[in-house]
Image (cartoon, coloured by chain):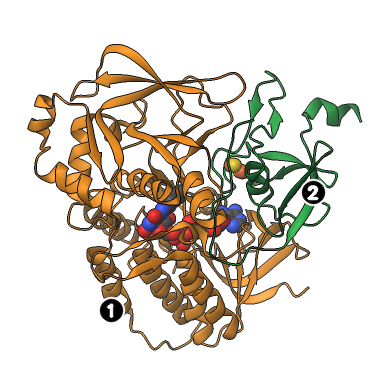
C-alpha cells in the first residue's frame, strides 16, 4: 500500500479529522491514523444538550459527518492502526494495518487525552472502570458497565456520565468524591469540588450538572460546605455526596461493594466507614494530555499545570519547534470538543501554509475561532485554561528569543 | 453472574454473531469491541494477572491501559476494547507463562 502522503495525522478525534479536512481542501493528500476502529476519538461518547444553542450535541453523529466529509475530500482514514514510533524525518511506524510506515511531508499529532489513575484499595477488581470507559460503554456500545454503579468523582465529566447512565436505566447508587489522594489534589476536597462546579455553572451541558453547578454557585459556597450538615444532595434522581469519599472497593473476584467515609471540607477523612452494595465503580480523576508520540518525535515538552500537565511546546499557529510538526486538540491542553474542532481547523491551515498552499481561512480568523470556541464551550475541564494558554504563548516567545525555533 | 447488560435500543442492531470466550459459546454484535460483547454477556474477568493471579477486566475502555488484553484468534496481548468482534472470533484468557510454555 502507498506510504507517501503530504500530511499524516495521528488521531481521528475532532482535532485530527477537522485538520485533515482543512488540509485536503487546500489540495493536500492526507492520511489519518487512529488505533480505534471508528473515527471520532472521544467525541464518539459525547451526548448532551448544549445550553447555548439548545441543540443536541450528538458526538457519534458529528463524528460520522466529519469522517464522511473527510472521505469525500479524498482523505484516507486508517482505523485500527496504532502508531508506535515517530522518526526524526516525521515518518510513522504503524501496527495493526498492512501499511508499515508512513512518510509524510508534514505531521500533525492530535492524540488527545488520557485519564489519570487514582488507586484505591480494590481498584483493580473487574468492575472498577474509568469514567471514560463508562461513557464509551454507555453511549457508544450501549452496554451497561453494571447494574448498580457508584460514581467516584464530582466534576463536570463524572456528573455528565452519571446522568447519562441514569437516563439509560442504570441504577446510579450515588456520586461521591474520588478517593482522597495527593495526585488528584484539585478534585478531592469538598471545597475544591464545589468551587470547580460553581465555575461551570453557566455552561453546564446537562440537567444534573447544571443543577449541581447552580447549587454549588449558590447554596454551596465553600463556606456553606463547611456548614453542610446533610451529606447527600439529590439532583435529577441521582444522589450527590459532596461530603463523602470512596475509600475502598471490595468483592471476591469482582466488585460487590464500596466503602465510603465522610470528609471534612478540606478533604480530611472523618467518622466511621460505611459500605454500600454496588457491582461497578466508576472513578474520575481528571485528564492529562497523551504526549508519548510528541516526546518520541523529539518535540520539547513543557509543564503547564493549567493546561493539564506536560504538553508539547507550541506556537500560536499550533506549530512546534520541529519543522513541519504540528500539534492540536487535547494534546495541547485539556478542553472540550468545540475547542478541539477549532484547533483542528487552525492546524490544518498552518500545515497547508507550511507546504506552500493557500487557505481560505486567514491565520487571524483561525486563531479567533479558537478563542471564540473556548468562551462558548459547554465544557470547561481546566479552571484556569486561559492563563495556561497565555503561559504557553510566553514560553514560545522565550524559545524564539533563544533561537530554538527552526520553522 | 453479575456484570453488564445491553441497553434496549431504537436503532437497528448490528448482526448477531457467535464467538467463544475460553471455549464457551457466546453471542455478540458484529463489529462491536470484543470487550463490549463480553460485558453484555456478563463477563467481567478477561484474564488473570501473571504474577498475582488476580482477575482483571476493562479499565479505561479506550486503549490506554492494556488491562483488557486477551488472546484473540491465536494472537496474544490484543486489547479487546479496541478489537471488533467477528463471526467465529475465538477469545481466550492467556497468562504470559502459558504463552512461554508453548
Ligand atoms: C474519557 C474522556 C471523556 C471526555 N468527555 C468529554 C465530553 O463529554 N465533552 C467534551 O467536550 N469533551 C470531553 N473530553 C475531552 C475531549 O478530549 C475533547 O472533547 C476532544 O475529543 C478532544 O479531541 P482530540 O481530537 O484532541 O482528541 P481525541 O478525541 O481524544 O482523539 C484522539 C485520538 O487519537 C488516537 N490515538 C492516540 N494515540 C494514538 C496512537 N499512538 N496511534 C493511533 N491513534 C492514537 C486515539 O485513539 C483517539 O481516537 C473527554 C476526554 C476524555 C479523555
Ligand atoms: S480497557 Fe484499557 S486498553 Fe482496553
> What residue did someone put label 2 on?
B19
Residue nearest the observer in this picture, A269 or A336: A269
* In this view, A392 is above or below A326: above
Q: Are marks 1 and 2 in contact (CB under 8 Å)?
A: no
Protein chain holding label 1? A
For image coordinates 66% across by 32% down, the residue present is B45
Q: Residues within 10 Å of mark 1 (few under 14, many from 20)?
A: few
Figure chain in green: B
For image coordinates 54% across by 62% down, the residue present is A11
* In this view, A101 is above or below A278: below
Residue A321 visible in the current orientation: no
Residue nearest the observer in this picture, B102 or B23: B23
Q: Find the residue positioned furthest to the top.
A: A272
For image coordinates 51% across by 30% down, the residue present is A279
* In this view, A319 is above or below A241: below
Q: Quadrant of the C terminus of chain A?
A: bottom left
Q: Is residue A230 left or right of residue A237?
A: left
Residue A292 in the image: x percent, y percent? 54, 48
The secondary structure type at the circle numbered 2 is strand
Figure chain in orange: A
The secondary structure type at the circle numbered 1 is helix
Residue nearest the observer in this picture, A328 or B60: B60
Disc marking residue A255: none
Residue A223 in the image: x percent, y percent? 7, 31
Q: Is residue B20 left or right of residue A158?
A: right
Residue A401 in the image: x percent, y percent? 30, 60
Residue A354 in the image: x percent, y percent? 47, 78
What distance separates the C-alpha of mark 1 from that of mark 2? 54 Å
Q: Nearer the viewer, mark 1 or mark 2?
A: 2
Protein chain holding label 2? B
Disc marking residue A364: 1
Amino acid at each position: 500500500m502507498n506510504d507517501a502522503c503530504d500530511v499524516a495525522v495521528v488521531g481521528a478525534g475532532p482535532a485530527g479529522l477537522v485538520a485533515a479536512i482543512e488540509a485536503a481542501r487546500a489540495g493536500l493528500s492526507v492520511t489519518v491514523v487512529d488505533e480505534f476502529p471508528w473515527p471520532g476519538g472521544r467525541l464518539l461518547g459525547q451526548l448532551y444538550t448544549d445550553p447555548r444553542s439548545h441543540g443536541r450535541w450528538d458526538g457519534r453523529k458529528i463524528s460520522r459527518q466529519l469522517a464522511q466529509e473527510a472521505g469525500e475530500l479524498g482523505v484516507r482514514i486508517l482505523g485500527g492502526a496504532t502508531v508506535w514510533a515517530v522518526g526524526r524525518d516525521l515518518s510513522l511506524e504503524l501496527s495493526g494495518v498492512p501499511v508499515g510506515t508512513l512518510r509524510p511531508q508534514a505531521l500533525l499529532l492530535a492524540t488527545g487525552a488520557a485519564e489519570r489513575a487514582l488507586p484505591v484499595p480494590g481498584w483493580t477488581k473487574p468492575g472498577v472502570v474509568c469514567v471514560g470507559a463508562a461513557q464509551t460503554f454507555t453511549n457508544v456500545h450501549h452496554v451497561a458497565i453494571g447494574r448498580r454503579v457508584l460514581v467516584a468523582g464530582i466534576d463536570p465529566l463524572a456528573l455528565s456520565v452519571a446522568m447519562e447512565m441514569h437516563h439509560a436505566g442504570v441504577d446510579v447508587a450515588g456520586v461521591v468524591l474520588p478517593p482522597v489522594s495527593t495526585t488528584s489534589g484539585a478534585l478531592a476536597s469538598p471545597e475544591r469540588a464545589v468551587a470547580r462546579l460553581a465555575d461551570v455553572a453557566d455552561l453546564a451541558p446537562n440537567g444534573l450538572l447544571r443543577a449541581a453547578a447552580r447549587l454549588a454557585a449558590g447554596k454551596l459556597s465553600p463556606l456553606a460546605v463547611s456548614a453542610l450538615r446533610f451529606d447527600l444532595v439529590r439532583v435529577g434522581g441521582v444522589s450527590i455526596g459532596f461530603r463523602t469519599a470512596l475509600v475502598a472497593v471490595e468483592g471476591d473476584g469482582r466488585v460487590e461493594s464500596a466503602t465510603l467515609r465522610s470528609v471534612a471540607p478540606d478533604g480530611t477523612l472523618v467518622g466511621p466507614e460505611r459500605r454500600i452494595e454496588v457491582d461497578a465503580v466508576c472513578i474520575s480523576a481528571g485528564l492529562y494530555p497523551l504526549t508519548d508520540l510528541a516526546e518520541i518525535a523529539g518535540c520539547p515538552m513543557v509543564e503547564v499545570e493549567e493546561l493539564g500537565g506536560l504538553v508539547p511546546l507550541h506556537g500560536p499557529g499550533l506549530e512546534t519547534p520541529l519543522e513541519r510538526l504540528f500539534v492540536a486538540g487535547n494534546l495541547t491542553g485539556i478542553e472540550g470538543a468545540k475547542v478541539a474542532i477549532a484547533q483542528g481547523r487552525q492546524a490544518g491551515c498552518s500545515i497547508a501554509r507550511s507546504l506552500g498552499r493557500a487557505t481560505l481561512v486567514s491565520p487571524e480568523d483561525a486563531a479567533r475561532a479558537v478563542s471564540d470556541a473556548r468562551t462558548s464551550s459547554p465544557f470547561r475541564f481546566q479552571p484556569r485554561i486561559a492563563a495556561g494558554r497565555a503561559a504557553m504563548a510566553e514560553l514560545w516567545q522565550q524559545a524564539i528569543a533563544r533561537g530554538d525555533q527552526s520553522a | 453472574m453479575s456484570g453488564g447488560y445491553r441497553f434496549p435500543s431504537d436503532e437497528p442492531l448490528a448482526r448477531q454473531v457467535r464467538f467463544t470466550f475460553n471455549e464457551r459459546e457466546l453471542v455478540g454484535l458484529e463489529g462491536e469491541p470484543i470487550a463490549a460483547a463480553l460485558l453484555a454477556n456478563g463477563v467481567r474477568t478477561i484474564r488473570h494477572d501473571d504474577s498475582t493471579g488476580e482477575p482483571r477486566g476493562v479499565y479505561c475502555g479506550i486503549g490506554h491501559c492494556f488491562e483488557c488484553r486477551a488472546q484473540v484468534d491465536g494472537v496474544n496481548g490484543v486489547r479487546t476494547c479496541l478489537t471488533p468482534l467477528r463471526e467465529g472470533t475465538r477469545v481466550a484468557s492467556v497468562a504470559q507463562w502459558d504463552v512461554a510454555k508453548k
